[in-house]
Image (tube, helix red, strand yellow):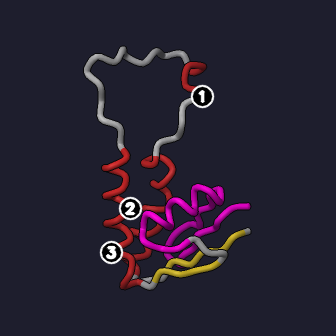
């Protein structure tokens, strides 16, 4: 199962249920089969998500070796929150600019 987030002002964003649950908790919402963010709720949701990305961003290690160019080395690496959340964050920003709500549902 997956979440699909929608707004009239932006392209839809679909993400796996576990990731969607995490994102919803980060913006102060309880994960639910369906829901909505009113336009007036978008600034707080954007700020909360941006803050969570900063907090979860791993600090660069000065003693860490430089990453190799070999793509196989990244096969088991976890996808960071910044990468998972960016499409949703862009949806929120575009919806805020247009004064449109964001809705979601589980498909």
Answer left or right for 42 relative to 102.
Answer: left
Are the two marked residues, 2 and 1, in contact with CB atoms closer than 8 angstroms? no
Q: Which residue in the structure is indicated by mark 2?
A: 49
Residues shaded magenta = 1-30
Task: Answer whether residue 21 is magenta in the image.
Answer: yes
- The kind of secondary structure element at disc 3 is helix
In this view, 1 is above or below 78? below
How many marks are shown on the rendered structure?
A: 3
Q: Position of residue 18 (x, y in %)?
A: 62, 56
| Label 3 vs 2, first from the N-terminus | 3
Q: Secondary structure at mark 2?
A: helix
Q: Position of residue 29 (x, y in %)?
A: 48, 74
In-front residue for pair 24/12 = 24
For label 3, count other residues whose C-alpha is less than 10 Å away and answer few (under 14), some (14-19) or many (20+). few
Q: Earlier in the sequence, mark 1 or mark 3?
A: 3
Spatial CA distance of label 2 from label 1 is 25 Å
Does 39 appear in magenta? Answer: no
Residue identifier under label 3: 43
Which residue is label 1 attached to? 76
Q: Earlier in the sequence, mark 2 or mark 1?
A: 2
C-alpha span from label 3 to label 2: 10 Å
Name the residue located 74 percent from the left edge and 68 percent from the top edge: 107
């Amino acid at each position: 199962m997956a979440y699909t987030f929608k707004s009239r002002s932006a392209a839809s964003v679909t993400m796996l249920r576990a990731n969607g649950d995490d994102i919803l908790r980060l913006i102060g919402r309880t994960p639910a089969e369906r829901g909505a963010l009113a336009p007036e709720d978008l600034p707080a949701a954007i700020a909360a998500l941006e803050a969570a990305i900063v907090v979860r961003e791993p600090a660069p290690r000065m003693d860490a070796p430089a990453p190799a160019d070999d793509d196989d080395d990244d096969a088991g690496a976890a996808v960071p929150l910044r990468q998972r959340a960016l499409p949703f964050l862009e949806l929120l920003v575009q919806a805020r600019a247009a004064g449109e709500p964001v809705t979601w549902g589980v498909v």
